[in-house]
Image (cartoon, rainbow, N blue to C red):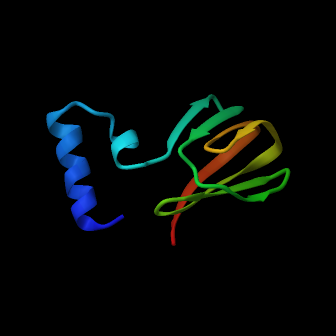
Amino acid sequence: MKKWQQRIGNWFTEHLDMPADVVLELPRITTIGHFHAYIENHRGLVLFTDNELRLRLNTGFLRITGESFVLKVMLPEEILLEGKMKEFKFIDS
């Protein structure tokens, strides 16, 4: 994201009480224990195996590793992943 867009986005979040994930197009990750992960605002599935999920983000990639992964829901910008999550890692592009 360009610097001026980020500055405008930061201004909106600070002065208009708008959520940062919406304004700055950041991913929102909600986990329930080690067994469920709900990811919003991704830009596409790059890799899926039974022990790794990799998603494209605006600023790079999100890599989730673990065991026994199952995609329960897959929508254009949302994914519900089940399995035993061990690591969430953001990778810059």
Q: Residue at x 85, y 50 (%)?
A: 50
User: Would residue 85 be found to the left or right of residue 24 on screen?
Assistant: right
Image quadrant where one finds the N terminus: bottom left
Q: Residue at x 21, y 41 (%)?
A: 12
Residue 15 falls in image quadrant: top left
| The residue positioned farthest toward the bottom in the image shown | 93
Q: Position of residue 61 (x, y in %)?
A: 57, 62
79 up-or-down from 4: above or below? above
Q: Position of residue 33 (x, y in %)?
A: 63, 28
User: Would residue 20 be found to the left or right of residue 79 on screen?
Assistant: left
| The residue positioned farthest toward the left in the image shown | 15
52 up-or-down from 3: above or below? above
22 up-or-down from 32: above or below? below
Q: Residue at x 28, y 33 (%)?
A: 18
Q: Residue at x 59, y 54 (%)?
A: 43
Q: Looking at this view, is 1 or 50 the one in front? A: 1
Residue 72 falls in image quadrant: top right
What number of labels is visible? 0
User: Would residue 20 be found to the left or right of residue 7 on screen?
Assistant: right
90 up-or-down from 20: above or below? below
Q: Position of residue 34 (x, y in %)?
A: 67, 34
Q: Looking at this view, is 41 or 49 the one in front? A: 41
| The residue positioned farthest toward the top in the image shown | 32
